[in-house]
Image (cartoon, coloured by chain):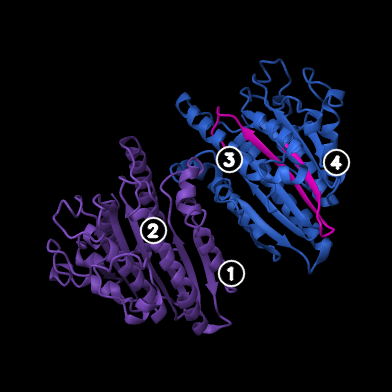
Chain colours: A purple, B blue
Amino acid sequence: MAVVASHFLLPPLCLPPPSSRTASHYSVSPKRPPPIMAASSSSPSLTDPQYGGGRSRFMEFPHVSAPHRDLMVELVSAVEARLDSYLLPCTLPPDVQYYENQSGTAQATLHVRSGHDSSPEQLGMELSEPGSTLNKIDFVLGSWIHCQLPSGGALNITSLSTYLNPSTDAPNFLIELIRSSPTSLVLILDLPPRKDLALHPDYLQTFYEDTKLESRRQLLEKIPESQPYFSSSLYIRCIVSPTAIMTRIETEAGGVERMEEILQSHVGPVAMEVLGIWLDQCAFGEREVGDSEISYLEKRDRLIRSKTIEIDLGSSLPRLFGPETAGRVLEAMRGVFK
Amino acid sequence: MAVVASHFLLPPLCLPPPSSRTASHYSVSPKRPPPIMAASSSSPSLTDPQYGGGRSRFMEFPHVSAPHRDLMVELVSAVEARLDSYLLPCTLPPDVQYYENQSGTAQATLHVRSGHDSSPEQLGMELSEPGSTLNKIDFVLGSWIHCQLPSGGALNITSLSTYLNPSTDAPNFLIELIRSSPTSLVLILDLPPRKDLALHPDYLQTFYEDTKLESRRQLLEKIPESQPYFSSSLYIRCIVSPTAIMTRIETEAGGVERMEEILQSHVGPVAMEVLGIWLDQCAFGEREVGDSEISYLEKRDRLIRSKTIEIDLGSSLPRLFGPETAGRVLEAMRGVFK
């Protein structure tokens, strides 16, 4: 059941302000302008019934602990604050934004906001980042899955990932928290590279060495309850960066309180820092590519997305939600990933 | 001092038979013909004075424990048994085959055997593998480094790596054992890929999934004294495979005996198995590439080798052996890696 949905789960943006507690808890890029939380004139209302209330349901994270939920809300809020004017509203069908199995023991949300084809300026929209005229955002994807376990416990996975388009070769962003019990956490946090790092040491230098991502990985490695996590999929291991945080944290001895402390005091701050690096250096970095590289990036991005869906969801989603629901969700996912 | 010489250390081949103990201890590819230990008619005598006795000095591994030495000798012997007729003798200058610092506290050997430009058949040589007409071997490189530490102990590194040429895209082989004390071992054991695995899932399947290399990694991961090892170089992390064994084993509680037991009963058998997979699937696998791919492989191989020398040896060798000796060895290394 490990990494049932890695890379799949990601919050759509256009969300409510985070709780005041998390807002003061994690800060990202204080030098940046304040978030633009209001929907722009060209966006449908966030409460538009056509969206089926999927976004607010997604943002509830109803089955995880307060520190876990706070972190997810804070992450989504930070992305939205910076990228809102570059993104369309989520247009997935309501029965893909929220779905469950027949017995109601498994529930999930999926929210995706694609980037505009045109830049915000071209659309006459207010820019959230002055000077960022080119829209590099392909889409932002978020989700949670909740699944009752035969043992009486529950599996909860929450995830957020952001994908850039081939106008830039900068890395994507991914965070996934997998909880098979209140005292267990598998954390995947990374800026997955979009080039072969062995062949592009300058890219490694720019996005992984100069940004000191390794120091963040080491911070979490030092938590006494933490040990490295190896994905059972070799392909997933191949598409993460050398500074990927892939860790399993077990706090049976310290109980739920210790896990919540770790989420709040260690995982949260590191996750927000990594997201801040992604926003500053990747989403808004000056890194555009020429025509010759675009087809390479298109090919590599497409292959990784296709393999990721197959590995993460191809077998687990039908098992959890039945073939019909899984088919509907997978079809929608493939549409987004194309 | 971690990974002072990763990838750099590798035994030249053309060695004496392993000790009877190790010979019976680790077996590789029993279905293969017996090793051809005698030098072929076109090779200079293995005791030819022009080689300065460097090979026999290398094969002594004089500063490591018996199980460690036995494993290295067995590995080199296995490579030589299969590849001898494809390799030239080592022609490095004697003062590169063996070198030391002025005070004699640091000593090292370096042995390299390059592949023939022509196939053994074209040279009229006896083939060690019937039917293997194309010489895919670029070179085989081995070494040990011994360095007395100010603390009174010693650092010992032994290594063997094999490099294929661009007529095939099959992975290389690498093993390195780093001992900073008799109860400490860092082991790096891998078939480093020669393509971007994210873009070539079929290659991942062939060389890493179908060969079940992950099960070998897991065997060593389960040793209680073992924990994952992260190279301090992000670039080194990028060039290893997803099944790379990168582990640190500390046996302070169990003492030297426990380390020797681990080397003999766990590390040795796994290392010989991984080498056997490389020999069967890579060195003698049917995997040749077209002209269009050769320039890609040449570029990628060249870059990785150049970066590897720079990272592993560029700063550590001058520090250990002084600038003059280090310069001589590095120049010879660059010549080989070209």
Q: Nearer the viewer, mark 4 or mark 1?
A: 1
User: Which amino acid, by three-letter code, is at mark 4?
Assistant: Glu
Q: Nearer the viewer, mark 3 or mark 4?
A: 3
Q: Do the residues labelled 3 and 2 touch (CB within 8 Å)?
A: no
Mark 3 touches mark 1? (CB < 8 Å): no
Q: Position of residue B169 (x, y in %)?
A: 54, 34
The three-letter amino acid code for the residue at tag 2 is: Trp
Whether residue A109 is visible: yes
Of circles 4 and 2, the one toward us is 2
Would you name the residue on which mark 1 appears?
Answer: A222
The answer to whether marks 4 and 2 mark residues whose Cβ atoms lie closer than 8 Å is no
Residue that numbered label 3 is attached to: B307
Q: Are marks 3 and 1 on the same chain?
A: no
Q: Does the magenta stretch include residue B179?
A: no
Q: Name the residue under label 4.
A: B60
Mark 1 closeness class: few <14, some 14–19, many ≥20 residues within 10 Å = few
Query: What secondary structure is found at the residue carrying circle 4?
Result: helix
Left-right relation of B80 to B293 = right
Disc 2 marks which residue? A278
Classify mark 2: helix, strand or loop.
helix
Q: Main secondary structure of the magenta part?
A: strand
Q: Do labels 3 and 4 share a chain?
A: yes
Q: Give the amino acid type for the residue marked by disc 3 in the picture.
A: Lys
Element carrying mark 1: loop
Q: Are labels 3 and 2 on one chain?
A: no
